[in-house]
């Protein structure tokens, strides 16, 4: 079994936090799936407006985006330095929705990751191919190009999120995901191969989490839709704990 600690990241996108996530965990933190757990890492990614609430509730929190510059004339943006001040410990970089809706390039994503590291915020960097790219047989070359732009020698987390599986209900099979994760790991610098966590994202649900999380090169999941449903997220957290305790 790998020494990498399992990480489950709840990406709430442009949605309010599930009400129960903000409720205080009574004694046993594991009773509330969104709260910190002893055996696995659980991180929530609320909107910027809700960040102070999740931090105040004791949840390990992250920003869904951070701009590299510390401050300045960048209307609508928020900087990594501001995320740090707000209590963020993680930041998502290059989610496919941002790559598509905000034209973020590989270089932009890399600059975000470096700025996050400078602020001591842990970047979770999303990469993954579209359906068209996969159908043309380009999945590996696309992922390799996205990966090569990144500061791979640093302490970062990669999230492999095939774009065709995000929010669509279509999940990569466990074998497909494991194959791509092993490929990604093989491209990391030798001294990072055992250390860097690689998460899978794309329609992770209660009924597929255990199989995906059991794969040797899958070190956790980035979860969108299912993370907004507390009972289902709780099932995914339980699957992660079960695998860790094996
Ligand atoms: C995501 O937002 O990164 C994601 C994987 O979403 P979903 O789980 O809904 O596919």
Image: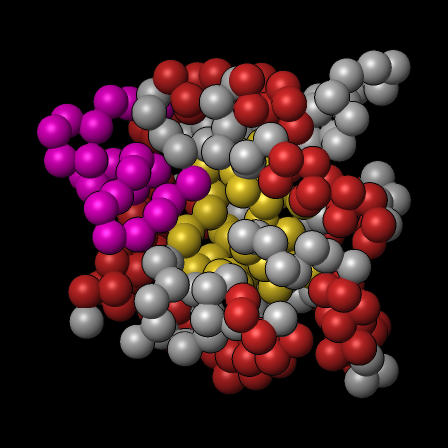
Residue 26 location (% of width, % of height)? 14, 26
Residue bounds of the magenta highlight: 22-43
Going by the picture, which residue comes out furthest to the left?
27
Q: Quadrant of the C terminus?
A: bottom left
Q: Where 70 falls versus 204 (above or below)?
A: above
Left or right? Give the position of 74 relative to 7. right
From the viewer's perspective, is residue 101 above or below residue 48? below
- Residue 243's image quarter? bottom left
Front in this rendered view, residue 22 or 141:
141
Question: For the view shown, which residue lies furthest in the front direction?
Answer: 191
Residue 98: image location, x then y, percent: 76, 43
Residue 175 visible in image:
yes
Q: Is residue 192 above or below residue 154?
A: below
Residue 42 lies, in percent from the top left, at 37, 44
Spot occupied by residue 130 in the image (x, y as percentages of width and height): 77, 66
Q: Is residue 40 magenta?
A: yes
Side of 240 where 29 appears, left or right: left
The main secondary structure of the magenta stretch is loop
In this view, the residue in front, 17 or 147, is 147
Q: Residue 45 in magenta?
A: no
Q: Quadrant of residue 205?
A: bottom left
- Coloured how? secondary structure
Query: As rendered, which of 161 and 14 lies closer to the eye?
Result: 161
Residue at 55%, 80% in the rendered image: 182
93 shown above or below 61:
below
Residue at 82%, 54% (x, y): give it: 106
């Amino acid at each position: 079994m790998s020494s990498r600690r399992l990480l489950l990241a709840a990406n709430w996108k442009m949605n309010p936090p599930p009400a129960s996530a903000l409720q205080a965990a009574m004694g046993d933190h594991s009773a509330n799936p969104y709260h910190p757990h002893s055996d696995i890492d659980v991180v929530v990614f609320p909107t910027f407006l809700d960040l102070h609430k999740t931090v105040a509730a004791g949840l390990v929190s992250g920003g869904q985006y951070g701009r590299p510059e510390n401050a300045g004339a960048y209307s609508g943006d928020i900087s990594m330095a501001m995320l740090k001040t707000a209590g963020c410990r993680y930041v998502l970089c290059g989610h496919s929705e941002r790559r598509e809706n905000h034209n973020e390039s590989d270089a932009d994503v890399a600059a975000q990751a470096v700025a996050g590291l400078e602020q001591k915020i842990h970047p979770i960097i999303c990469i993954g191919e579209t359906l068209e790219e996969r159908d043309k047989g380009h999945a590996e070359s696309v992922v390799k190009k996205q990966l090569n732009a990144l500061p791979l020698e640093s302490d970062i987390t990669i999230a492999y999120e095939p774009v065709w599986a995000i929010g669509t209900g279509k999940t990569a099979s466990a074998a497909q995901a494991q194959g791509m994760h092993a490929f990604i790991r093989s491209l990391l610098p030798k001294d990072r191969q055992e250390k860097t966590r690689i998460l899978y994202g794309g329609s992770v649900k209660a009924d597929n989490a255990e199989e995906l999380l059991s794969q040797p090169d899958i070190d956790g999941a980035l979860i969108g839709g299912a993370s907004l449903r507390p009972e289902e997220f709780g099932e995914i957290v339980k699957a992660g704990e079960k695998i860790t305790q094996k």
